[in-house]
């Protein structure tokens, strides 16, 4: 039996900053229930939801074993628009038929935009 990966939990002590960041720069919509400590960020298109979970005092933010990769058709166009909106990406790298660029979110998690999904 196959299972669909539908959500990614991000532990953070910066819930509001993270929610604003992903809504502003990646178009997620915010869903917050009064009786739930988890904030859900839903993709506007088909895609994975992000769940922002309060980090415990001993949890370290900004681990590097996982990277969130957002598919974009044109990396340079996306990065230019993001820069105009206050988010700087690093150098655009060219790989085997696609491009990608990296940045960090407010909790220092690794973020990438990539055109790999659109390569021919």
Image (cartoon, rainbow, N blue to C red):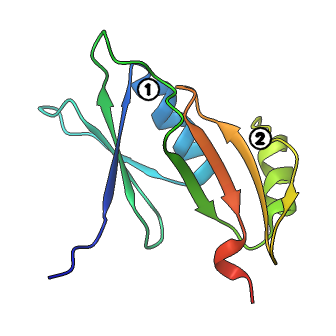
Question: Label 2: few (<14), some or many (≥20) within 10 Å?
Answer: few
In terms of depth relative to the viewer, which is nearer, 107 or 96? 96
Residue occupying the point 60% across, 60% down: 70
Residue 53 as seen in the image, left or right of residue 72: left
Residue occupying the point 52% across, 27% down: 62
Question: Label 1: few (<14), some or many (≥20) within 10 Å?
Answer: few
Residue occupying the point 46% across, 36% down: 19
Q: Which residue is mark 2?
A: 85
Residue 119 as seen in the image, left or right of residue 109: right
On screen, residue 98 above or below 9: below
Which quadrant of the view contains residue 115? Answer: bottom right
**Residue 63 placed where, x, y %?**
49, 30
Under circle 1, the secondary element is: helix
On screen, residue 15 above or below 19: above
**Residue 65 placed where, x, y %?**
49, 40
- Residues tagged 2 and 1 counted as in contact (Cβ below 8 A): no
Cα separation, mark 2 vs mark 1, equals 18 Å
Q: Which residue is mark 1?
A: 16
User: For the C terminus, which image quadrant?
Assistant: bottom right
In terms of depth relative to the viewer, which is nearer, 8 or 28? 8
On screen, residue 25 above or below 55: below
Under circle 2, the secondary element is: loop
Which quadrant of the view contains residue 77? Answer: bottom right
On screen, residue 56 above or below 52: above
**Sequence-first disc among 2 and 1:** 1
The residue lying furthest to the top in this view is 57
User: For the N terminus, which image quadrant?
Assistant: bottom left
The residue lying furthest to the bottom in this view is 120
């Amino acid at each position: 039996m196959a299972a669909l990966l539908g959500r990614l939990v991000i532990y953070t002590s910066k819930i509001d900053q993270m929610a604003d960041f992903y809504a502003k720069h990646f178009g997620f919509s915010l869903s917050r229930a009064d009786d739930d400590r988890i904030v859900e960020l839903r993709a506007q298109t088909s895609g994975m939801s992000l769940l922002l979970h309060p980090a415990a005092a001993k949890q370290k933010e900004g681990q590097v074993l996982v990277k969130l990769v957002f598919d974009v058709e044109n990396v340079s166009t996306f990065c230019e628009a993001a820069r105009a909106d206050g988010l700087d990406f690093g150098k655009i790298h060219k790989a085997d038929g696609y491009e990608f660029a990296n940045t960090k979110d407010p909790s220092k998690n690794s973020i990438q935009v990539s055109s790999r999904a659109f390569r021919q």
